[in-house]
Amino acid sequence: GYSPQIGTLVSMMTWMRSVILMPVKGMTQKDLDFLLDEKANSIGALLLHLAATDRLYHVHTFQNVALKDLPESFKEKWGMPMELGEPARKGIKGHDLDYYLNILGETREETLAEFRKRDDSWLMTIDKNWGWGPTNNYCKWFHVCEHESNHNGQIKLLKSRLPGAKPASE
């Protein structure tokens, strides 16, 4: 249901999402809310951050909204998980795993539905005003995939530090 290059991108994004979800399988609310220290993010906040990132690029690339012009409704719903930090440490907690999985699933399904409406020409469209220079939609969405990969490492580190977690050598 996708053009060739979009299909390749979707395959990468789907694989990375499955890799993100493996280490959180079976986590309790307490696990998801755990803070390693006063500067860390919780695993739950990181999961919500990934959904916010998906949604950010959805608004930017599908609705053609410049990042500096994000609507107030986006900022209200997704601002805290997008930015993380102290507000997220205080505000993103008390949810079970299904809460995060449902939001991740909903945002990704919306993204996939939009990809089905587009073709490789759209994917290769260059944004000449992108912050680091001319960038196409493929690179932007690959960044979403790469972003999940980065946070996968954080999630695994946090999981290894959960109270009662077994040492890596076991």
Image (spheres, rainbow, N blue to C red):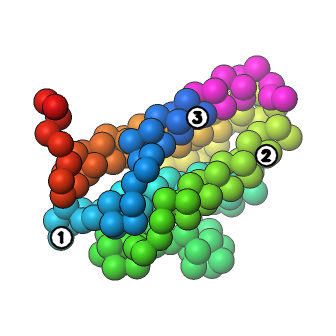
Is residue 11 a member of the stretch shown in magenta?
yes
Pinpoint residue 123: horizontal percent, then vertical percent: 71, 33
Say which quadrant the N terminus sits in: top right
From the image, tell me which residue sits under label 1: 38
Tag in front: 3 or 2: 3
Pinpoint residue 144: horizontal percent, then vertical percent: 53, 43
Q: Main secondary structure of the magenta part?
A: helix
Q: Secondary structure at mark 3?
A: helix
Amino acid type for the residue under numbered disc 1: Glu
Residue in the picture at 53% in, 39% down: 17
Q: Residues at badges 3 and 1 in contact (C-beta under 8 Å)?
A: no
Is residue 104 a member of the stretch shown in magenta?
no
From the image, tell me which residue sits under label 2: 114
State which quadrant residue 106 falls in. Answer: bottom right
Q: Secondary structure at mark 2?
A: helix
Question: Residue lying farthest top?
Answer: 4
State which quadrant residue 12 falls in. Answer: top right
Instruction: Tell me which numbered mark, 3 or 2, is placed earlier along the sequence.
Output: 3
Pinpoint residue 134: horizontal percent, then vertical percent: 56, 38
Amino acid type for the residue under numbered disc 2: Glu
Instruction: Tell me which numbered mark, 3 or 1, is placed earlier along the sequence.
Output: 3
Question: Which residues, given as a range, are shown in magenta?
Answer: 1-12
Q: CA distance from mark 3 to mark 2?
A: 14 Å
Q: Secondary structure at mark 1?
A: loop
From the image, tell me which residue sits under label 3: 13
Amino acid type for the residue under numbered disc 3: Met
Q: CA distance from mark 2 to mark 1?
A: 38 Å
Which is more toward the observer, 35 or 49?
35
State which quadrant residue 94 falls in. Answer: bottom left
Pinpoint residue 111: horizontal percent, then vertical percent: 71, 47
Tag in front: 2 or 1: 1
